[in-house]
Structure formats: C-alpha cells, structure tokens
Amino acid sequence: MSIVTKQITLSIISVVSLSLFFLTGCFGPPASIKHEENGRQFLNDNKYSKAIEEFSKAISKNPNNSFAYNNRGIAYASLKQYELAINDFSKAIELKPELLEPYNNRGFVLELKGETKLAIEDFSQSTRINENNEVAKNNLANARRKIGDLQQTINDLSEKIDQTNPPQFIPEDQKQEVSNLYLERAIAKYELFTQPKGQKPATICKTSQYCNMVIADLAISVQIQPNNPKSHRILGLTYRALENFDKALSSFNKSIELDKSDETALYERGWTYMEMMQPYKALEDIDESITLNPENSHIYRLRSWILMSLGEWGKAKSDVDFLLDLYPQDPNLHYLLGLINIHSGSIAEGLKDISIAQSFLGNQSEPAYILASSQGMAKQENYSQALENLNSALQLDNKYTYGYLLKARMNMNVQNFQEAKTSYEAALRLSNDPEKSNSNLSPIPDIPNLFKSIGQIGVSATVKKPCPLDSPCLNSLSKFSKVLDNNPNDIDTLMKRAELLVSIGDLKYAINDYTKILQLTPTNTEAILLMATSLRSYLRYESQGIVYTKCKPGWFSQCNEAIKSLDFVIDTNPNEAMAYFSRAELKRLVNRPDLSIEDLSKALNLQPNFVEAYVKKGLSYLEMDDPTSAIQNFNKAISLNPTNKEAIANRGIANLLSGNIKDSEKDFKKAIELGIPNEIISTAKNKLSNFSK
C-alpha cells in the first residue's frame, strides 16, 4: 500500500464508523439493507471491489439509499477512482443534505485531487452541521493551511476559545476539546509565522515574539490536558526552532512517553539529535520511526543524510535507491546518489548521477551540483575540467568555502601558486566570517548550552594562514607532489608531505595523506597517531572567541575510521597512553563522553601525571552534566600544573554550573590573568546564562 493510500484509508474509514450510526435508522426493502450490510463488511475488510458490487445492488433495490451511495463512494475513493467517488458523495448529499459525512468525504477526495478551495466549502458545511465533529474540524483546518488561509483559521479558533471558560474552570468532559483548540491555534500560528519562503524558523523565532506566542498557546493546551502527546510534540518543534534543543528534547521525550507508537515524534527527536551533531542517537530514533511506519518517505530521506555523515555509503545508497523508486525525477535524490558514489569510489557513476540531477533542473544551474562534479573530477585527477567547473560554481555562488579550498588544492597540483594563494585567502576570509559563508567548513554555531556541553576555553586556533608566495613550503609541496605523481605509493614522501601540510594548517589534506599511508601499511603506528592528532586539531577550531569541538557533519566517518585505527594501535601496544588519549578525544568528538572517560582513565593508569588527560576527563564529565566530577578532575590537573589556564577556566564553568558563584569568579579572574581573553570568558558566562533561562 502506498503512503498516500494508507492516509486515505485511515481518514475515510474513520468516517465509515460515523456513517454506520445513521444506518440503524435506514428504511427500505430488506434486500437493499442486506446488500448494504454485506458491503459494509467488505469495506471493513478492505475488499473494495466486492463492497462496490454489494452497494450497487443495494442502490438498485433502493435508489434513495443515501448511505449506500456514501459508502460506495468510500470504496471508490479507496481504489483512487475519485470521480466516481465524488459522484456518489454528491448523490448522497442530494438525498440527505442534513448528513455531514458525505460532505466531509467529498471534501477529502476533492483535496486529494488538488481542488482545495472546493474541499474547504464541503468541510465548512460539515462543521456547520456538527461543529463538534473532530474529523470535519481537522480536515477544514488542514485544507485552510494548504491554501495559506491561516489567519482565518486563527480567527475562527480564537472565536471558539473566547467562548470557553478560563483554563482552570473548564469541565472535565470538555478538557480534551478545549485543549485541542489551543493546540490547533498554536499550529496555525506556527505555520503562519514560518510561511515566508527563504526564512528559516530559527531566524524568525530569534527576531520576533512569534514563537513565544505559539509556546503560550501550547502551554495552555498542556495545562488543560497534560497527556496530549501532540501538544508536547509541537512544543518540541517550536523549541527546536528557537534552537533551545534541551527543551525540545524534553518535549519530544514526553510526547514519546505518552504515545510510544508515534513515529513522527521519534522522527522529530532524531532530527533534533542531528542538529545537535549526535548522529548515533539520531539514527536510533530514525530506525525505530521507520519500524513503526516503513512507508513514510521523509524518514528515509533523513536517515540517508545521517548515514552519509557517518560514512555508511552502502546503507545510505539503499535508502536513496528506495526513494528514487518512489520519486524517480527528484533531482536532489540523484544528487545525493552522486555524492554517495563519488565518495565510495564509483566516481564515473557518481558523475553520471550528478549530471542526471542537473538535467532535471533544465537551464537552471545548481552550484552544489557543479561543485560535486568538480570533486569527482578532482578524484579522477582531471584538474583542468574540475577547475573549469569550480569557477562556474563560484561565479554562481561565491560563498562556498569548500569550493575555494578545493580550487586552491587543485591549483597546487598544477603548480599555479598565485591562484592557490588567492583561493586560500578567499577561503580563510569566509571561514572567519560565517555570516558570509554557506559551507560547513566555516564556523558552525553549536547547541545553546555550548560551553556546558563542550567547555573548551583557551584552545589555540588551528586554522593557520596559507604559505606566503616567498615561502619555500609551496616549492616543497610541489616537489613532494611531483614525486607522488610518479610513485603514488611512496610512503616516505607521503609522510613528509602530510607533515608539511599539518605545519601550514592544511589539515584536511594531511589527513587524506595519512589515510593513504594507512591503506598501504595498516600497521603504521606513527601514521595512525599522527592522523588522530591531525583530526583532533582539524575538528577543533576557534572563531570570534568561541571554540567548537564537535565532529562536523560529513566528518563522522573520518572520526570513526581514526578510532578504528587507534583500536589497532591499542590492541598492538596496550601500554601506549597517548593512543588512549587520542582515542578518547575522538570519542568525545563523536558525542560519546562516557567512552572518552573510560579511555582517559586507562591513559591515567599508565601515566598518572598526565595533566591534559585530567583536563579532558573533566570536560567529558561536563558534557555528561556532572560538574562535581568535572571539578575533581580539573583540581587534579591544577595540582599538577597550577598555571594550566584551560583547567582553571573550565573549572570556572563547572563551578558556575554547580552554583559556586564566588569560586567561579575567582577561576575566571585567574584564567584571564594567565592569558585567556576576557571576551571568551564573557561569552561563556552569557551562554550559560541564556541556557539557564
């Protein structure tokens, strides 16, 4: 059964039960009644063709049987024979205009055909006949939203709300109905405020009081009826739009607690985890959501994105292939399939997929598609064509940080140093000004409780300026690249080039070289440790006084590969403290502070005076909302090194979270004296203050 068919069936079958109520009063020849009863049984068993036969016989025996027309219309609609269904519903209305079911059913089918305005007329008539019918009210509200008549929906709901008692005086038997009124008004407000194209909900919520108005209605809905899972779910959506992810999670958790079969709440919670850069938790929710409703294509789309970020190319491809069977002309799906194939080694297939995606757009060029093609061509070492494509993409959109980095790298390969320098500088300008960049290589704001979850203060920036033209490093890189052009498996030269790339801040390509070395020599412990260090440095960068230390989207696969490599190092040499330390840092980067603590404890058993391990262990405890244990570890680090400014600054955060305000201020003052910029401390305090609110 298709997704749409399932929706039709569920919605219309609910009306059948309402129609049956009236059938007990139906008068007519006994033969007509018998055929109608048979038809209703076939309808309930989803045997629509047989139901149509029986209802037709009932009509032949009694041409005035409006119930038979209504129910035969339901059977036709279930078979997607919409015109025949509309004809039957219209005949039922002609025979008994006082019944709401035929109006509601005809409106539902009209909406499926895209005739929403006509559907609204039918739904409105249904509610006029019985204003308390939930099916008719919901259908009317949904149809109005579809055509943008949201303000009228809000006005109608407000009028009904004004006629009710104050929340604290609502009779028990009316609570569910009134709670739903506030809920529906909240949904209409949310959709009205977030309707303008080109504006993200988060942008609107941050610059207005719109979302607070939505939350106010939802708060009353929950106050009246605390156990309405939908109210909690919509509340979660609104908090997520405000980027208050902790409150969003709390609301989704409550919604799921009340209705464990709600795949939508699980999907939305998974989406929230992904925005918090916690893909493993997101994947758990998405998998469970698909188990509950394997026909919801939106869930597969999100799961494919998560799997791609984790480097699970084969599994991601399965999801995208499934979606392409449903939507074979969706250009974005072909684009995703192209990225998957390019990154998994099927470059020619990937380029073909990107070309198909572009063909569906016609004359409109999509910079992201062109950039993806450039990546594939670069992997094929077709640098001239890749550069030509890149220039086209950057002409269409000059905000692609990664585009400039890719262009710089390719110009290095063809020894065009001036162009490489210009491209590097453009990338750095964008990286330092995230408002002007649309690339995930630019600084990305993390979750609202940034410093509570991360606690990284005083870490030096790792993004360095590119080689100046008068520096020998460009010539050295060129020399190493020439050697590798002739002998791509020269491990010694790969090591030298990787070390040079690290020294000039080109960490991404250093990691690529270390990866190549490990493909050739999987037991190369030195390369494994250096790659882990480079990854940690690359994924920890500083911008405008705020330091982020989470694995960025698209880099989880590299983090996981590095963790696997370190697994090998530790299995080979279980007494390597630095290996445990590096693996712990990577595990923290992929949002597993619990596993990070385990590795740091092992490192400290091997090296009891390992100051940095105590600091990182404290940060991991901060991420787990355990400031007391964090303080204990920061204290140990400070006892070993009284001037460790990172430990002191982060102890200040832990003290602030614990309510030790005086101790916190002392730590912050000391950290500033040791060289932590005052603006970083202020930012941390503001973040914590905003979070606590």
Image: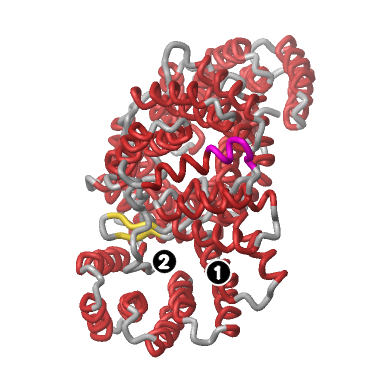
Sooner in the amino-acid sequence: mark 2 or mark 1: 2
Name the residue type under label 2.
Answer: Ser
Q: Position of residue 399 (x, y in %)?
A: 33, 34
Magenta span contains residue 363:
no
Using residue 38 as the reference point, say whether residue 392 is left or right of it: left
Residue sitting at x 42%, y 46%: 180
Identify the magenta region. Answer: 482-488
Foreground residue, 425 or 675?
Answer: 425
Q: Which mark is residue 453?
A: 2
Q: Would residue 483 be counted in the magenta stretch? A: yes
Q: Position of residue 410 (x, y in %)?
A: 46, 33
Q: Name the quarter where the C terminus is drawn.
A: bottom left
Instruction: Check disc 1 and give the amino acid type.
Output: Ala
Q: Is residue 525 left or right of residue 578?
A: right
Report whether residue 99 is seen.
no
Q: Nearer the viewer, residue 519 or 439?
A: 519
Viewer-proximal residue, 237 or 313?
Answer: 313
Q: Which residue in the protein does label 1 denote?
A: 584
Give the answer, above or below, for where 657 lies relative to 486. below
The rendered magenta stretch, by its main secondary structure, is classed as: helix
Q: What numbered label is drawn on residue 288?
A: none
The relative height of residue 132 versus residue 688 in the rendered view (above or below) is above
The mark closer to the camera, 2 or 1, is 1
Mark 2: secondary structure: helix
Which residue corresponds to the image point at 53% horizontal and 16% vertical from the top-left? 113
Where residue 1 sits, quadrant-wise, is: top right
Where does the image place residue 187, in percent across and percent down from the top left?
38, 41
